[in-house]
Amino acid sequence: MSFPRTASPSRTSGTADAIAGGTLTTIIRGLSGSSLDLVERGKTIFLPGDPAERVYLLRCGAVRLSRVYESGEEITVALLRENSLFGVLSLLTGQHSDRFYHAVAFTRVEMISAPAASVRHAIAADARVGLMMLQGLSCRVLQTETMIETLTHRDMSSRLVSFLLVLCRDFGVPAEQGITIDLRLSHQAIAEAIGSTRVTITRLLGDLRSEGMLRIDRKKITIFDPVALSRRFS
Amino acid sequence: MSFPRTASPSRTSGTADAIAGGTLTTIIRGLSGSSLDLVERGKTIFLPGDPAERVYLLRCGAVRLSRVYESGEEITVALLRENSLFGVLSLLTGQHSDRFYHAVAFTRVEMISAPAASVRHAIAADARVGLMMLQGLSCRVLQTETMIETLTHRDMSSRLVSFLLVLCRDFGVPAEQGITIDLRLSHQAIAEAIGSTRVTITRLLGDLRSEGMLRIDRKKITIFDPVALSRRFS
DNA sequence: CAAGAATCAGCAACCAACCAGACAGGAGTT
DNA sequence: AACTCCTGTCTGGTTGGTTGCTGATTCTTG
């Protein structure tokens, strides 16, 4: 497998959602009922069963959407980055529906939100709002589809590598050598995102480290050379 | 695991995208450069590398988005149903970008398409268009996220069952007894969608059949009792 | 409509990957 | 200093991928 696989979605979405995000912020801030919220790491934004009535735009930080099962097991459905729109369920119908995901601040989060009704109103008033939100959602679709690619890899090693490249794209910051994923990730958190177990992730990350592909410092992963890593697919 | 997991996203999205789809059709048909296309089963709609300049609305049938690797391996990123919007990449920027997925008609397909520029224009002219497309894309996001849930199941049996329930939701039609998935699915196609192999799918479907959960007639699967099937999770 | 081609389903044997469970030592927190 | 959460490692045991082959369907084409 070649790098373009993960590289091409990134470049296109990366620029576009930043543009949409930047302008959308000021628009949503102006809506009636809008609010700017700061959420501490680990705090819940909404719970399954809560009424879905607000739309959110993540300005800063990362949000994890997950589903919790009766067994206590938890899986991650999406790790949202800056400029992501979420809570889109509330846009769907005029009627009240309930959240079915658990949204938690994965880092310290800065976000803005507004009632779905206000958003609908704003779109009616200014068509550019609709277009920008459309672009924001398109990015979400592309990101989610990339994640599906990641999850269809058969062996866990490829799956992990593919996931790390996704994280580089979404949360990577340049480091002295390579790119650092700016998230404090436990092995458990990674396992929950790619459908594996903590033990397996520990082993595979150990392998990658001893191969000299990456470094882990205080739960932050630095990939020395993403292109070289992408060659390490099965 | 309980049925609500797959049931809740379905109900909300099912109704909303039908509404959006119905009205959007007439609007998009009126755009300059729009066209109504009939595509035979197995024919390509767009290829990786094609310029992304049109937006599509699937009116009838199913479209498979996939990625092909150098190895010849192919994975399915999405199986789109009626009223799905796709080709959203073209909406992202004003600039030209290229498709990175392969879109193939999985059944005989009836779809309408229009240049992204016309769509942007239409949104500017009538804000309701933007809202409807937003709802359509929201459905896509929810569907894709359901698929991610499916793919994070660790054992293949659960993964297959979860996938079958997704297909029931998206392509199910009532049958004399139970629900028939109105797609001609080879075991290979299922494997490519859930990241498994043909052989495994054959075995697992055989198990489910001998348990009396389903019937397969000329590649069409009939689920006798979705609720009972959902209880068959690990 | 019939014959050949191509695709698909079913089966078996082998084996590697990875899950489960358990435990000890480390890092970070209060 | 006590505590919690996280990482690292080990030992079976099982799932599911791989390969190879056969017979059945379905599609194509004369």
Image (spheres, coloured by chain):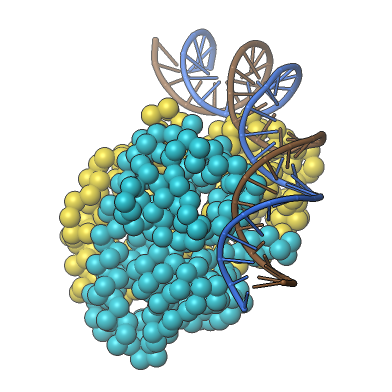
Chain colours: A cyan, B yellow, C blue, D brown
The answer to whether B225 appears left or right of A173 in the picture is right
Which image quadrant for residue A214? top left
Q: Is residue B156 visible?
A: yes
Q: Where is residue B156 drawn, in percent x and y?
A: 66, 42
Q: B62 above or below D1? A: above
The answer to which of A43 and C9 lies nearer the viewer is A43
| Residue closest to the eye, B1 or C10 | B1
| Position in image of residue D25 (x %, y %) | 61, 26
Q: Which residue is drawn at 56% across and 81% down?
A: A51
Horizontal relation, residue A75 to residue A165: left or right: right
Q: Which one is nearer the viewer's eye here, A64 or A202? A: A202
The picture quadrant where one finds residue B55 is: bottom left
Residue A193: percent from the left, percent from the top?
55, 55
Residue B101 is situated, as x and y percent measured from the top left of the image, at 36, 43
Residue at 54 percent across and 38 percent down: it is: A207
> How many numbered badges does the structure rendering display?
0
Q: Can residue B172 be seen in this view?
A: no
For image coordinates 36% across by 73% down, the residue present is A59
Above or below for B20 versus B98: below
Quarter location, residue B200: top right
In this picture, residue B219 sits left or right of residue A226: right
Name the residue at 25% across, 41% down: B50
Quarter of the image that includes the N terminus of chain B: bottom right
